[in-house]
Amino acid sequence: MRRPVAAGLKVPLKSFLTSKAAFFILFAIILFLAFFFRIIGLEKRPLHTDEAVHGVKFGYLLENDDYRYDPHEYHGPTLIFSTLVPAWIKGSQNIKNVSVTMLRSVPVFYGMLLVIITLSLLPLTKRSVTLSAALLTAVSPAFVFFSRYYIMEIMLVLFTVALILSLHRYYLSLQMRWIILAGALAGLMHATKETCIITWIAVFSAGIMVLLTKKGELRKTWQRLPKAHLVTGLLSAKIVSSLLFTSFFRHPRGIIDSILTFQIYLNRGSGDLTAHIHPWFSYFQWLLWNKQTGTPLWTEFWILSLGMVGALRIFSSPPQKHRHFWQFLTIYTLLMTLIYAAIPYKTPWSMLSFYHGWLLLAAFAVAELAAQRASRIFIIVYIFLGCSHLSLQSWQLIHDHDTDESNPYIYAHTHRDIYKLVDGIHELCRASTQGQKECLEIICPGDDYWPLPWYLRDCANVGYYNHVDLQYPAARIIVSSPSMQEGLVAKLYELPPPGQRNLYIPFFKNGVLLRDGVELDLYVRKDLWDEWYQNSP
């Protein structure tokens, strides 16, 4: 009796779906999806203040071949030095040739590495865990959005994951190469952002807790570790960190400042002199539920819920393979979450450091539930619906809602009005006989004029002030906060003697928004206004 064709295909199809070839085909599809979400329309969203500050600092490095670490602001140098690579590839030699796409290509690159590094999970677990981790990282709105953001957070998360994997490899093998790599990664974390110390505390504490779960394991582990290896790992961390903080030993002071900075950020994290104070539950609110009338539902509940299932599963019925690693990851993630929730200083991008742990635990849960016949259909439907909704949110975040305040990851962001303001300034400069050398005066209280220094980087004579400076003559183009109007009127119309007063005309009928709550006015002197008007179409 002949077997039906379908029956003959069943075994080969099942064999193919569980093969290495199928795994790498699916992984390649996930990589393409991740790249699509991260690369499309990088120039579209206006630069956030932090992005602009880093961009200007990079421009200084590019033009002057010099970098000095500032322990009070701006974080570490890895982002700045990494940006030299796309600049060299494109042949850019000054800040005028640096584009927003070039800047944001750096976090895109590290964001892609964060997807690729999930391959390092293969020796530790099933292929389905690796695929799930890659897929969730690829479509998570938080990781998509901040992989397109010229700040350090994605780099810090990547170096953290690599550090944990390297330490685990060293724990298993005691091979020196792994402790050297772990040390180098710790050095990169230090040179990336000061909050690395939170991660180090959580990693160390979670490791100790896991070893304490088995009697005598902590002492046994300490005895088997070659102490020379530990010293080598610390030296590796110190060398990498020192190289970057000193700008390759040109500014030795950077080593001292890289340590002093922890006290500065400790004060900031505790709420001193900062506006970024939020309740303990803010991270969970940003991740779980954000819905306003007429806006999409923003939520990553799909991932967090699975992460909690994964954490419960790991402790209720621990996996036989690399049990200590998964227990460590669970404890580490819980510690990171508790620490970050307890710190009053909160920004949406800061939560990536603990959220990535939940994402990996979610991947573990997907694989475990898919392996059981009773829950297989449920988890397939859940992942399909969840990833579809996450992908839709990621598309909305980078397309129609990239500056929408309903988007939980938009935080003190630059308003799209900045394009209108900058275009107006450039129109006036083109109309002027001085061109880009025309003098501009930007007056904002509290130096709250960023990211204008980035967008006006091609203008040669721009003065930035936090008050109306009465010592110097007024420029022909003035951008001013409405709160400075009284002082500006005095400078333009009261201090100059009769016959030397010039009329200034508002370029726009209404003020423009720099960001929510920050309005600016553009004024142009009458003679330049006439030049512009005569040349305007």
Image (cartoon, rainbow, N blue to C red):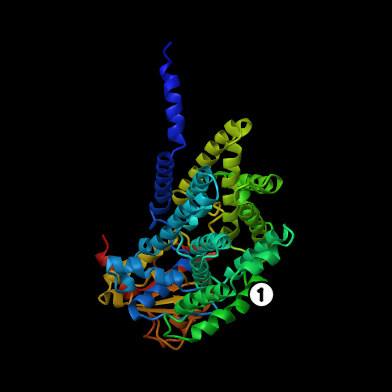
| Side of 399 relative to 295 (left or right) | left
**Secondary structure category for the residue under label 1:** loop
**Residue furthest right in the image:** 215
Identified at 68% across, 59% down, the residue is 210
Q: Which picture quadrant has residue 244?
A: bottom left
Q: Is residue 306 above or below residue 468?
A: above
Vertical position of residue 530 compared to residue 118: above or below:
below
- The x, y position of residue 503, in whole percent, is 38, 76
Q: Residue 260's image quarter?
A: bottom right
Q: Which residue is tagged 1?
A: 272
Residue 506, percent across and down?
A: 41, 68
Q: Quadrant of the C terminus?
A: bottom left
Which residue occupies the foreground of this view, 25 or 2?
2
- On the rendered image, what quadrant is the N terminus found in? top left
Horizontal side, residue 35 vs residue 332: left or right:
left
Q: Residues within 10 Å of mark 1 (few under 14, many from 20)?
A: some
Residue at point 37% right, 85% down? 500
Count the numbered circles shown: 1
Q: Position of residue 270 (x, y in %)?
A: 67, 71
Residue at coordinates 67% horizontally, 71% vertically from top-left? 271
- Decide which of 372, 40 is in the foreground and name it: 372
Question: Looking at the image, which is closer to me, 278 or 35?
Answer: 35
**Residue 73 visible in the shown view:** yes
Query: Foreground: 28 or 468?
Result: 28
- Please state if 311 lies on the left or on the right of 163 as rendered: right
Q: Is residue 254 above or below residue 154?
A: below
Q: Does residue 529 appear in this view?
A: no
Extreme-top residue of the structure: 1
Amino acid type indicated by mark 1: Asp
